[in-house]
Image (spheres, coloured by chain):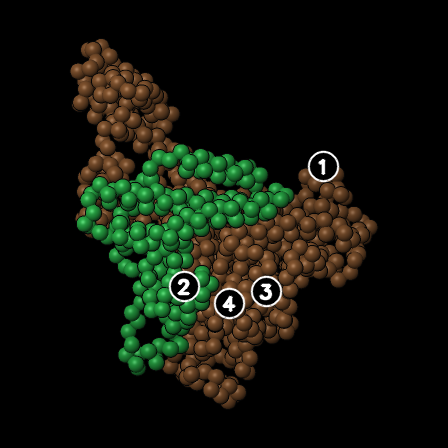
C-alpha cells in the first residue's frame, strides 16, 4: 500500500482513500476487470496465466468446490462436476424464456423450473440461479483486484471499497440489467453505474480523440450483438441511437457450424441420439475450428462424435455460415441509421468491439459493405472494461477529463391500456435522464381503482413485451368513465433506472413504483424483487383473456341497465322479460366468476336479446343512418 | 406553463431564433449549444466539481433532465410548433382539423406507401433505398408545412393574442392555424410510423 502511494503521486485526490475504482466487463464468454495501476488504466491479469480475459465459465464440484475461469473448462467431461458456460445469456430471464432458449440451444446442464422461484441450475448438492453464478464470476474478478492491490490492513478504519461501473449490452432490458447489478452487489462491489457496452467502448476511445465526430460501434460478443451510433463533440458523448439482439453472438456461430457438421456427417437417426453433452462438446469443437480458420484457410477437426478420421473444414464453408449472421447485423445497422436519420457518409469511424470481431471473415465483409475506416488502436476485448473504468474514475472524482455521457434508453417503455395494447410513453432512443408525463382516464363509470402495468419493448401488444411492474392507484372519485384525469409520470435517471408514478389530478391521490433494486438490500430481498419483476413477464395469457371477457361482460350489463332505465317502455312485455332474464343471467355469471367460455356465451346471448331494444331506441332517438349498432355502443354515444 | 425557449434564450416561434441578436440556429448549432450547457449541468460533472460549486454557493437552477426535456421538445419541429402555439395561448387539446378532402387523400396515399414498405419487411432487397426516398419526400412535405408557420408567424401570434377581434374572426383564423398544425402533425406522424417499420 505504501509503495503504491509513492508510485502514484497526486493520482488520487485523497491518498488515504480506501477505494479502488473498477471498470468491469461481464461478458458471455469472457469477463474483465480494469483498474488504474502505476498511473495507467489497464485490464488486470490473473496471477497464473497472465491473461486479462477471464473465461466466463464456472465449475461446481462434488465437494462444494467453485472454480471460475480457464481451469473450469478442464472439468467439462467430468460427470461429478457441473460446468456452466455463457451464464450471461440467462441472467434476468424468466423460466419460460430459459425453456424456450434451451429448446433451441442445448446446454450441458440441467435447469430446475420448480415453484415460483427464479429458474435454477442443478449443481452437486444444490441449485444456483443465474444471478448466483454471475456473482461467483464477479467475486473472482474482485479477487483479482485484491491480488494486485494488496489485502487491507485489518486495523484500517474502513474496509477497502470497490466503486465499480459494470457494462451491459445496450439491448439488455430492465430485468436483465437489474439481475446483473444484483449479482455485482452480492459479490461486494459498490456499483456506481451500469453503462452500455458500446458506449463504454466509445469512452475508451475518447481518450485520444478531441474532434467532433460520429462513430458507429459494432459490438459482436460471445452472446450478444449491439450497434450504436454515437456523436462526440466538446467532451460530450451523445448516444444517438442503438439497436441489437441479445441472442446473437459468436456462440451462435459455433452452434450453426456444429449443426452444419452434424448435418453433413451424421444420419438423422444418429443426430436424434445426440445428448445435450454431445451437443455442448460439438459446439466446443466448432469454436476451436472457427478460431483456427481465422488464421488459416483450412483446418482439420478431430471430432470422434462425427467421424474417426479428421474432418477438413475450409474458410469458404465458414464464410457461408458467417454470411447469415453478418446479414442480420447489417439489418440492425440500417435500423440505427433510419432511427437516427443518419447517412453512412456522416460517420467518421467504425469501432469494433468484442472478441468475435477479430474474425478476418467478418472484418472483410464489413469493409466490403461499409466505406468507413475501422478503429484498431485498442484491443476489442479490453476496450469495454477500459471505458467503464474511465467513467468510474470520473464518478468518484478521479478523472475530471473524461467526457460527459448522454445516453439513451434502448427500448421503448409504456403502459398497458384497454385490450392489451401498449401505449408508448418513452420511445426507444430517448436521451436519459428523462421525465415524461401522459394523462389517462378510466374506461368504466364509477371506476375507483386503476391497475397500471408498466411494460418494455417495441411491440404493440402486451403479450409481446416485457412486463416490468404493476401497481395500483386506488381512491379515484367515482365519476363517469373518461372524466377522471390520471397523470402518469415516467422518469429514467442517469443510471437508466425507471420510476413510475400516477396521480389523480382532482383529488391528488398518488401511487408510484420504482423498478430498482437499491443498494443495501439483503440478498433475499434482492432476489425477491427480481423474481417478482421477472414473474410479471409470465402473466398467464388465459388469465388475461378471462379478465378481458369479464370486463366486456360488465360493460354490457352496465350499458343494458342504462338503456332499460331510459327506454324500457319501448319494448313489449315478453321481449322485455327475455332481455331482463339475459341480463340477470350474465350478471350472475360475473358474480360467480364463471369460466370465460361460459361468460362469452352469456355476452353473446345478451347482445342478441338487446338488439331489438337498440333498434327501437335508435328509431326513437335519431331515425338516421345509425343502423347496426348494438346497445352498448348506443349507451356510449349518449354519454358523450 | 414552462417556456422551454427561455432555457436557451430563444424567441418562441416555429424556428430556433436567438432572443438577443435574432440569429437563426440550425439543428446542428442548437445541438452544440445544448452540449455546452450539458457539460455544465450534467450530474456526472458534479461528482468532480461538487466542491467548487459548494464553495461558490451556486445553486443549480435547472437540472440536466430539464434541459434534456426542453431540448427534445425544441429540436423536433412538431413539438416545437405545438409548444410555441400553446405558449401563445392556443389550446390544442381535443381540437381537430376540419375535414379536408385533399388532406384525406394525401394521408391515404402515404398510408398505402407505408403499408407497401411494411409488407416487404426491412430485410427485403432494396428496402433501404425505397425507405430513404419516402423519408425524403415526407420530410420535404413536413418542412413546407413548417414553412407556412414561418411565413405567417406574426399573423398567427396576433390571431391568438388579440382579444379585440370579434369571436367569429378569431374562430375562423384559429381554425386555419389548426388545419396547418394538423398538416404538420400528419407528416410528423407518418415519419414516426416509417421509423417503426421493421
Could you tell me residue A345's position as x and y percent?
Answer: 60, 59
Q: Position of residue A58 (x, y in %)?
A: 57, 60
Q: Please, which chain is the residue tagged with disc 1 on?
A: A
Q: Which mark is residue A232?
A: 4
Q: CA distance from mark 1 to mark 2?
A: 73 Å
Number of numbered discs overlaid on the protein picture? 4
**Which structural element holds mark 4?**
strand
Q: Are marks 1 and 2 on the same chain?
A: no
Q: Which residue is mark 2?
A: B24
The chain whose colour is brown is A
- Between the C-alphas of marks 3 and 4, the distance is 11 Å
How far apart marks 1 and 4 lie (CA) works out to 56 Å
Which residue is disc 3 drawn over?
A348
Q: Report the residue at 54% width, 82% height from top.
A: A39
Question: Which residue is disc 1 drawn over?
Answer: A269
The chain ID associated with circle 3 is A
Between residue A187 and residue A551, name the one nearer to us.
A551
* Front-lying residue, A141 or A72: A141
Residues packed near mark 2 inside 10 Å, few (<14), some (14 to 19) or many (20 plus): some
The earlier-in-sequence mark between 3 and 4 is 4
Identify the secondary structure beneath mark 3.
loop
Amino acid at each position: 500500500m505504501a509503495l503504491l502511494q509513492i508510485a502514484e503521486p497526486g493520482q488520487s485526490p485523497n491518498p488515504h482513500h480506501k477505494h479502488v475504482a473498477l471498470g468491469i466487463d461481464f461478458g458471455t464468454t469472457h469477463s474483465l476487470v480494469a483498474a488504474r495501476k502505476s498511473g495507467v488504466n489497464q485490464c488486470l491479469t490473473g496471477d497464473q496465466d497472465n491473461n486479462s480475459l477471464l473465461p466466463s465459465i464456472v465449475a461446481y464440484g462434488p465437494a462444494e468446490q467453485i472454480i471460475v475461469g480457464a481451469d473450469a473448462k478442464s472439468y467439462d467431461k467430468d460427470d461429478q462436476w457441473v460446468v456452466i458456460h455463457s451464464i450471461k445469456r440467462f441472467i434476468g430471464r424468466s423460466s419460460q424464456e430459459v425453456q424456450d432458449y434451451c429448446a433451441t440451444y442445448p446446454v450441458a446442464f440441467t435447469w430446475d423450473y420448480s415453484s415460483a422461484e427464479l429458474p435454477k441450475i442443478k449443481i452437486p448438492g444444490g441449485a444456483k440461479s443465474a444471478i448466483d453464478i454471475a456473482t461467483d464470476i464477479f467475486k473472482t474478478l474482485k479477487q483479482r483486484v485484491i491480488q494486485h492491490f494488496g489485502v487491507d490492513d485489518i486495523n484500517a478504519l474502513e474496509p477497502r471499497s470497490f466503486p465499480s461501473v459494470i457494462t451491459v449490452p445496450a439491448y439488455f432490458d430492465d430485468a436483465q440489467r437489474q439481475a446483473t447489478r444484483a449479482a455485482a452487489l452480492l459479490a461486494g462491489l459498490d456499483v456506481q453505474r451500469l453503462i452500455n457496452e458500446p458506449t463504454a467502448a466509445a469512452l475508451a476511445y475518447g481518450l485520444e480523440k478531441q474532434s467532433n465526430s460520429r462513430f458507429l460501434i459494432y459490438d459482436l460478443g460471445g452472446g450478444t450483438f449491439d450497434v450504436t451510433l454515437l456523436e462526440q463533440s466538446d467532451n460530450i458523448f451523445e448516444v444517438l441511437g442503438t439497436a441489437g439482439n441479445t441472442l446473437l453472438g459468436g456462440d451462435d456461430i459455433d452452434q450453426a457450424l456444429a449443426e452444419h457438421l452434424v448435418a453433413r456427417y451424421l444420419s438423422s437417426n444418429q443426430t436424434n441420439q445426440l445428448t445435450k453433452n454431445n451437443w455442448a462438446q460439438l459446439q466446443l469443437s466448432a469454436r476451436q475450428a472457427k478460431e483456427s480458420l481465422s488464421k488459416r484457410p483450412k483446418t482439420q477437426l478431430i471430432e470422434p462424435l462425427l467421424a474417426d478420421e479428421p474432418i477438413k473444414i475450409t474458410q469458404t464453408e465458414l464464410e457461408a455460415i458467417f454470411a447469415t449472421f453478418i446479414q442480420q447485423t447489417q439489418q440492425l445497422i440500417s435500423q440505427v441509421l433510419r432511427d437516427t436519420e443518419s447517412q453512412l457518409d456522416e460517420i467518421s469511424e467504425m469501432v469494433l468491439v468484442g472478441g468475435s470481431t477479430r474474425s478476418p471473415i467478418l472484418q472483410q465483409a464489413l469493409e466490403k459493405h461499409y466505406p468507413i475506416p475501422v478503429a484498431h488502436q485498442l484491443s476489442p476485448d479490453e476496450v469495454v472494461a477500459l471505458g467503464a473504468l474511465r467513467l468510474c474514475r470520473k464518478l468518484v472524482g478521479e478523472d475530471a477529463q473524461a467526457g460527459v455521457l448522454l445516453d439513451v434508453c434502448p427500448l421503448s417503455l409504456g403502459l398497458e391500456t384497454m385490450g392489451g395494447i401498449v401505449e408508448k410513453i418513452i420511445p426507444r432512443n430517448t436521451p436519459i435522464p428523462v421525465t415524461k408525463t401522459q394523462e389517462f382516464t378510466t374506461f368504466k363509470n364509477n371506476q375507483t381503482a386503476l391497475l397500471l402495468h408498466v411494460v418494455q419493448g417495441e411491440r404493440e401488444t402486451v403479450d409481446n413485451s416485457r412486463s416490468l411492474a404493476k401497481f395500483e392507484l386506488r381512491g379515484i372519485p367515482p365519476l363517469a368513465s373518461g372524466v377522471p384525469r390520471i397523470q402518469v409520470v415516467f422518469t429514467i435517471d442517469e443510471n437508466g433506472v425507471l420510476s413510475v408514478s400516477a396521480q389523480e389530478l382532482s383529488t391528488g391521490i398518488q401511487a408510484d413504483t420504482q423498478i430498482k433494486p437499491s443498494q443495501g438490500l439483503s440478498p433475499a430481498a434482492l432476489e425477491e424483487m427480481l423474481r417478482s419483476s421477472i414473474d410479471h413477464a409470465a402473466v398467464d395469457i388465459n388469465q388475461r383473456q378471462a379478465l378481458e371477457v369479464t370486463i366486456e361482460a360488465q360493460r354490457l350489463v352496465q350499458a343494458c341497465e342504462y338503456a332499460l332505465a331510459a327506454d324500457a317502455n319501448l319494448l313489449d312485455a315478453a321481449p322485455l322479460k327475455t332481455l331482463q332474464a339475459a341480463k340477470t343471467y350474465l350478471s350472475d355469471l360475473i358474480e360467480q366468476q364463471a369460466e370465460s367460455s361460459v361468460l362469452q356465451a352469456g355476452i353473446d346471448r345478451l347482445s342478441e336479446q338487446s338488439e331489438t331494444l337498440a333498434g327501437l331506441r335508435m328509431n326513437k332517438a335519431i331515425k338516421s343512418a345509425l343502423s347496426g349498432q348494438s346497445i352498448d355502443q348506443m349507451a356510449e354515444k349518449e354519454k358523450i | 406553463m414552462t417556456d422551454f425557449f427561455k432555457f436557451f434564450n430563444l424567441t418562441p416561434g416555429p424556428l430556433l431564433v436567438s432572443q438577443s441578436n435574432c440569429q437563426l440556429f440550425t439543428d446542428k448549432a442548437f445541438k452544440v449549444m445544448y452540449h455546452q450547457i450539458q457539460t455544465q449541468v450534467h450530474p456526472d460533472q458534479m461528482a468532480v466539481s461538487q466542491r467548487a460549486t459548494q464553495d461558490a454557493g451556486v445553486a443549480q437552477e435547472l437540472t440536466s433532465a430539464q434541459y434534456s426535456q426542453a431540448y427534445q421538445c425544441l429540436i423536433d419541429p412538431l413539438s416545437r410548433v405545438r409548444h410555441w402555439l400553446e405558449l401563445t395561448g392556443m389550446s390544442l387539446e381535443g381540437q381537430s382539423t376540419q375535414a379536408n378532402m385533399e388532406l384525406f387523400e394525401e394521408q391515404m396515399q402515404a398510408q398505402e406507401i407505408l403499408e407497401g414498405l411494411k409488407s416487404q419487411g426491412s430485410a427485403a432487397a432494396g428496402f433501404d433505398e425505397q425507405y430513404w426516398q419516402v423519408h425524403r419526400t415526407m420530410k420535404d412535405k413536413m418542412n413546407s408545412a413548417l414553412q407556412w408557420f414561418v411565413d405567417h408567424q406574426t399573423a398567427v401570434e396576433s390571431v391568438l393574442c388579440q382579444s379585440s377581434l370579434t369571436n367569429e374572426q378569431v374562430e375562423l383564423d384559429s381554425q386555419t392555424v389548426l388545419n396547418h398544425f394538423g398538416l404538420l402533425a400528419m407528416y410528423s406522424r407518418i415519419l414516426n410510423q416509417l421509423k417503426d417499420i421493421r
